[in-house]
Amino acid sequence: MTPREFYRRLTTFRRRDLRKHRKGIILVLTCLLAPVLFGFLAYAVDTGLTATTQTRMQNAADAAALAASQEIRAAIAAASAGQGDAQIDANSIAVAEARAMAAQVAAANGVYINPERDVIFGRRSFDESTSSWPVQWNQAPYNVVRVEVHRDNADPNAPDAELPLNFGTFVGKPSVALATGASAFVEARDLVLVLDYSGSMSYDSELRSIGSVGRDNVVENQKEMFDALEVNTGNLTREPQYLTLTSPEGSDPMISVTFKGSSIYAVSSKDLSNVVLELEHDGRLYQQKTEGLHDPTGEFSGTGWLAGKKITKCWIKSGNNKSDDGPGYGERFENSVAAVKTAFNLNDTPYPFPSGSWNSFISHARNNSYVWNADLEYTYGGPTFVNYLLTEKKAFSQTPALWKTPEYPFHAMKNGATLLLEFLDTLDFGDEVGIISYAQNAHWETTLDYDGYNIDIGSDPITSDYQSLDLIQRHRQAAHYSSMTAMGDGINQARQLLEQYSRYGSRPTVLVITDGNANEVPSGWSLPADWDWNELTDYDGDGTANYRTYDRSKQYAFWEAVQGMDRGYTFHTMTVGADADRALMEAIAFAGEGVWIDVPGGETVEDMQEQMLQAFGEIAGRVPPPTLVYDK
């Protein structure tokens, strides 16, 4: 055997031995590493199971918390609609409903909760010292709901048993305890009321509205307003009265004449023989005579082309009486301003308000076209006096006592605001309110310095001092400052109020109310060149705007609202009466993700009152949708 052959055989044997040796080592390593590899695999599988279950539990908790808090929101809405008390319903009936809803939603997500143990209620309120919103659990009134989901019960047969692991037994941990939770709250609002203080907010109490509200309803309302004024008006009473003049005491015959505008009614202690009327037509005076009379009473008016004309004076011939005005003329009675003032004791009664006079009131009662249309011409009393004030002297600087009176629709708006503030006070969810009024200009309503009050909330104009807010707004009147309708300026001031005083973490909300049309715009203002109505008022999603306007005053009001919307403000709107701009207000509410409420009014002021209260109630109960609070 050669050395080369010997070497070849030797290396062949070595290779065979090495292969056998390697196979043995791999087998040993496999036996040693198999448990480790199995452990890693089991860990991966069970970790995935745990993570998936935890996610499902969290999703269920989120959904259950939102659903439960929605029950409180629904109870608030029902209470605001007059179906219960705000705090009682939100914290008793709604609690039971919220627990049941949370359990139902959790079950629908494949998760068990114990509604009595796992659904917890609390109160979220603003802490001024820290500018934060801490939650006090189990403290009413409830505006926060927390839902906890447990799988931590050691009893494997319990519905909330620990999560069994697929391979946990092999590592001495057959199950794992899991728990999670979610909280949802009803957001507190910083609500600014933008109230219409224009002159038209008294129209339903004026004789101009007898066509829509009804003559008797308007007149009765004016009588109530007259009573509410509580001022000395001489012998004027709430009932309308004609001027009645009588002969001097001791006369024979005794005659009385009642002037009714275009007619007179005469009564004598003896038979009448003739009556002469002096009538006015186109600034000139004419006389007509009626003869051959044989009764002691009679009603007389112009005839022919003088029919329906105003009677300025008359002569009543009865018995042997006479007049210095000529033969055949009886006793003279004159329908003069001086006679009216004497008859109603106005000469000795100072006119009760800063602006106006008895003379101008008498002229109104004689000449105003609305007075004539209501068949109240030449009557003196509650209706004509109130109509004079509302038509000619309605501003606070002119007739400050009008705030006391039920002038509509302004009074209905005041009552609605009172209801809203009372509801929020009872609800006690942390809402704060500010008030902006607008007429020719907008005003922050923060002070009251008359009627025995000295209120100033200027340092905190968005406040929870509902009592002060209510006193301020109840001491206002239609045309309090002026008579125009600067809606855009009102929205502008609401935005500025929120920018300066809104609390971090609250929901900025604006309610705009009008009974008319915007008619004021800053000089030189115009819409920006890139303005696109299609982006803002496409109600039906077809890409085309459902509202647009070329009226600059309306454009300005809408543009100001959009500036607030860009800052996250919610805009609600309310239209009041037949002449309100419904199209604009609907558009603002749509773009502002709010609600538009229409109060059309009705045949009576009571209809208006009821509708207004319902509208304000809806706004009061329209709290923001629940919001999740994520645990840190």
Image: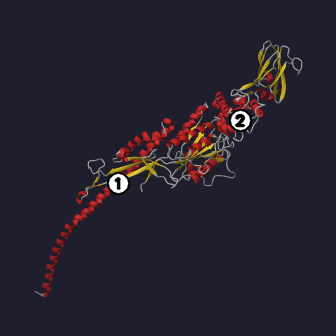
Place residue 229 in its image quadrant.
Answer: top right
Picture coordinates of residue 315 (x, y %)? 83, 20
Q: Nearer the viewer, mark 1 or mark 2?
A: 2
Q: Amino acid at mark 2?
A: Leu
* Circle 1 SS class: helix
Tell me the quadrant of the picture where the N terminus can be found: bottom left
For marks 1 and 2, give the CA distance: 72 Å
Please indicate whether residue 25 sits to the left or right of residue 240 in the image.
left
The answer to whether one can see residue 546 in this image is: no
In the visual, does 181 lie left or right of 452? left
Q: Is residue 241 above or below residue 393?
A: above
In the image, 320: left or right of 227?
right
Q: Amino acid at mark 1?
A: Gln
Q: Which residue is mark 2?
A: 389
Residue placed furthest toward the left: 1
- Up-down: is 129 above or below 322? below
Residue at figure coordinates x 28%, y 47% from the top left: 158
Q: Point out the residue furthest to the bottom here.
A: 3
Instruction: Identify the residue at image location x=63%, y=31%.
Output: 213
Q: Position of residue 431 (x, y in %)?
A: 52, 46
Residue 293 is left or right of residue 578, and the answer is right
Quarter of the image for the C terminus: give it: bottom left
The location of residue 247, given as percent across then percent down, is 81, 20
Q: Residues within 10 Å of mark 1 (few under 14, many from 20)?
A: some
Tell me where residue 16 appears, x and y as whole percent: 15, 76
Which coloring applies here?
secondary structure
Point out the residue furthest to the top here.
294
Q: Can the viewer see residue 326 in this picture?
A: yes
Return the residue nearer the eye: 80 or 457: 457
Number of numbered markers: 2
Q: Which residue is mark 1?
A: 54
Depth order, front residue of 333/623: 333
